Amino acid sequence: DWDSSHGNVNMTKEDIINLAKELKQNYVDSFMEISHFIESDNQIVVKYNHKVATIENPKEIMLIAKVVAIWSFQEGKIMDGYLISKPN
């Protein structure tokens, strides 16, 4: 599940891969700056800033979202995830 500025979106693995491909096509550079990483039992919580450089201005790095992701694991595999993003 992803709580975005467009509301709640339920994404499959394929949806997540397609979103990553779309981001790759639209930006020269895209990266995350992790500020918090918490692991407890079978869950990981990551807080990060998503930054990009556009094709038009590749030297300028822009913050496009602040994100918190919660991932649940079972036997070493991701079972589900929850993502909350806030546009900058």
Image (tube, rainbow, N blue to C red):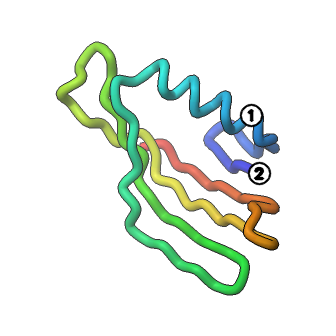
| Disc number placed over residue 88 in the picture, else none | none
Which residue is situated farthest in the front direction here? 75
Residue type highlighted by circle 2: Asp
Q: Give the residue number, with chain letter if any, for mark 2.
A: 1
- Identify the element where label 2 is drawn: loop
Q: Circle 1 sits in a helix, a strand or a loop, which is it?
A: helix
Please provide percent x and percent y for residue 68. 56, 61
Q: Residue at x 74, y 34 (%)?
A: 15
Instruction: Say which label, 2 or 1, has the lower sequence index.
Output: 2
> Which residue: 65% across, 65% down?
70
Q: Which is closer to the viewer, label 2 or label 1?
A: 1
Identified by mark 1, the residue type is Asp
For residue 81, above or below residue 56: below
Q: Position of residue 10 (x, y in %)?
A: 81, 44
Quadrant containing the C terminus in the rendered view = top left
The answer to which image quadrant residue 4 occupies is: top right
Q: Residue furthest toward the left?
A: 59
Q: In the figure, is residue 40 to the left or right of 7?
A: left
Q: Is residue 38 above or below residue 61?
A: below
Res. 80 image quadrant:
bottom right
Identify residue for label 1: 15
Q: Which residue is depicted at the point 57% across and 23% down?
A: 22
The x, y position of residue 21, in whole percent, is 58, 26
